[in-house]
Image (spheres, rainbow, N blue to C red):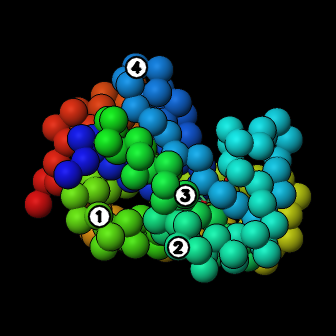
Amino acid sequence: MSKGTLLVLSGPSGVGKGTIVGEILKRRKVALSVSCTTRDPREGEVDGKSYFFISRQRFEELIKENGFLEYSKHFDNYYGTPRKFVEEKLQEGDVILEIEVDGALQVKKAHPDAVLVMIEPPDRQALFARLRGRGTESEERIESRVKRADYELSKAPLYDYVVVNDDLGKAVGEVIAILEKGERKK
Ligand code: 5GP
C-alpha cells in the first residue's frame, strides 16, 4: 500500500493546467513527477525540471527496461512518466502527474486507485479559437492541435472528476479538495 494519492491531471493545451499545478505546489506538500520526452526544449525550459530531455534511442531503451509507468506518443514525440520516481514518492506522500489522456488512462489501469482529474475550459469554442489564433504555424498544424484538444475533452467521461477552469483560485481549491479526499468518486 502506498501512503499518498496519485493524482493525474489532464486537459487540452491552453486550458491552464500548468498554472493550476504550480499553485498546488505552492500550497501543499506534493511531489510533481518530471516526465521524459524526446521533443526539443522550448525557450526557458530546464532539463531535469521541465522535463528530462532524452533521445529517441534512450527513450526506447527505457521502454524495454520497463522504466515507465506509462508513455505515449504525442505529435510525433514520446512522453513518459518515470516509474521509479513515482513509486518511491508515493511511499512518502501525494504525487501529481500532468499528462495527456492516453497516458492517464494507462495509469488508471496499472493503478486503479489513481484519481483522474480533467481540467476543462469554461468555453470550448473560445479555447479552440485561441488555439487557432496562436503563432504563424501551418494550417495543418493548427487544425491538428484543435482536433487533439477536442479528443482530450472527449475522454472526460472516463475521468473521476471534471474541474472547469473559469476562475483560477476556485479551480485550484477544487483540485486541492479532491487531493485531500484522496479517493476516486466512483
Ligand atoms: P508539451 O509538449 O506541451 O509540454 O506537452 C504536450 C502534452 O504532453 C501535454 O498534454 C502534457 O500534459 C503531456 N505530457 C507531459 N508529460 C507526459 C508524460 O509523461 N506522459 C504523457 N502521456 N503525457 C505527458
Q: Can you tell which quarter of the image residue 5 is in?
A: top left
Q: Residues within 10 Å of mark 2 (few under 14, many from 20)?
A: few
86 relative position to 12: left or right: left
Q: Is residue 166 left or right of residue 39?
A: left
Which numbered disc covers residue 82? 3
x, y percent for residue 157: 27, 68
Q: In the figure, 7 relative to 29: above or below?
A: below
- Mark 3 and mark 4: Cα distance apart in space: 24 Å
Pair 2/4: label in front: 2
- Return the residue at label 4: 27
Q: Nearer the viewer, mark 1 or mark 4?
A: 1
Question: Which numbered disc, 1 or 4, marks the residue that appears first in the sequence?
Answer: 4
Q: Which residue is mark 2?
A: 66
> Left or right: where does residue 138 sit relative to residue 155?
right
Going from the N terminus, do you reach mark 1 or mark 2 first? Answer: 2
Q: State the image coordinates of residue 55 (x, y, percent, origin top left).
A: 81, 66
Disc on the earlier residue, 2 or 4? 4
Q: Residue at x 53, y 66 (%)?
A: 68
Disc nearest the viewer among 3 and 2: 2
Ranked by sequence position, the earlier of labels 3 and 4 is 4
User: Mark 3: which amino acid?
Assistant: Pro
Q: Residue at x 41, y 41 (%)?
A: 89
Which disc number belongs to residue 111?
1
* Residue drawn where x is 86% and y is 71% of the image: 138
